[in-house]
Image (cartoon, rainbow, N blue to C red):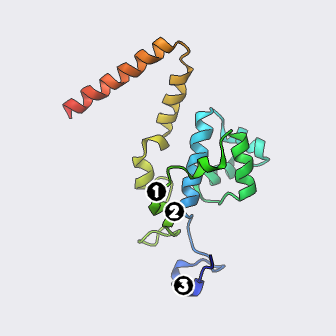
């Protein structure tokens, strides 16, 4: 796919002729890296060490500020024990088709409305899932599951 930079208004391009802001696909892939890393209980520093990078570089990947190259994504998939396709799962058609800038001319962020609406992207959800699966007794785990569903149902009725 060839990009025609001349067709894009100059104010939407950076100094080197590239578009400004992270691409929504980079944000999505980064959020999936963060989700999997958190589910495994791995710190950014530990992932960085495994990749011979600083934790700051891992942060940039997870925010989508820096694009993850194919060979690096391959390494990450092996470290996090997931297929490469994992990083592209659950990507909306809008994200897949979007350009790096929103209609307002601002770069989307990992804290965008879409990101905040996704309960699976929240750290609290990931920590809850990890804690849930640390319960070794299947009967206790099932009771916690039923209790959580019951509380949620009661909340829905009162809303």
Residue at 66%, 45% in the rendered image: 83
Residue found at the far left of this picture: 158
Q: Residues within 10 Å of mark 3 (few under 14, many from 20)?
A: few
Instruction: Give the residue number, with chain letter if any, for mark 1.
Output: 92
CA distance for labels 1 and 2: 6 Å
Residue bearing the label numbered 3? 10
Question: Circle 3 sits in a helix, a strand or a loop, which is it?
Answer: helix
Residue where numbered disc 2 is placed: 96
151 lies left or right of 112: left
Q: Percent from the top left, x then y, of residue 13? A: 57, 78
| Image quadrant containing the N terminus | bottom right
Mark 1 neighbour density, 10 Å: few (under 14) some (14–19) many (20 or more):
few
In this rendering, the answer to whether 3 lies above or below 120 is below
Cα distance between the residues tagged 3 and 1? 28 Å
Residue 131: percent from the left, percent from the top? 53, 24
Check disc 2 and report its element: helix, strand or loop.
helix
């Amino acid at each position: 796919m060839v990009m025609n930079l001349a067709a894009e208004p100059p104010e939407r391009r950076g100094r080197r002729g590239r578009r400004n802001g992270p691409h929504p696909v980079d944000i999505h892939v980064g959020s999936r890296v963060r989700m999997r890393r958190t589910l495994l209980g791995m710190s950014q520093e530990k992932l960085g060490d495994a990749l011979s990078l600083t934790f700051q570089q891992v942060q940039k990947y997870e925010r989508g500020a820096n694009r993850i190259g194919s060979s690096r994504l391959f390494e990450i998939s092996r470290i996090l024990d997931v297929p490469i396709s994992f990083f592209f799962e659950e990507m909306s058609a809008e994200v897949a088709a979007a350009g790096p800038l929103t209609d307002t001319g601002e770069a989307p962020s990992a804290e965008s409305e879409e990101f905040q609406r996704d309960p699976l992207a929240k750290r609290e959800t990931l920590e809850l899932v990890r804690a849930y699966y640390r319960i070794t007794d299947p009967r206790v785990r099932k009771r916690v599951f039923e209790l959580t569903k019951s509380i949620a149902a009661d909340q829905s009725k009162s809303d």
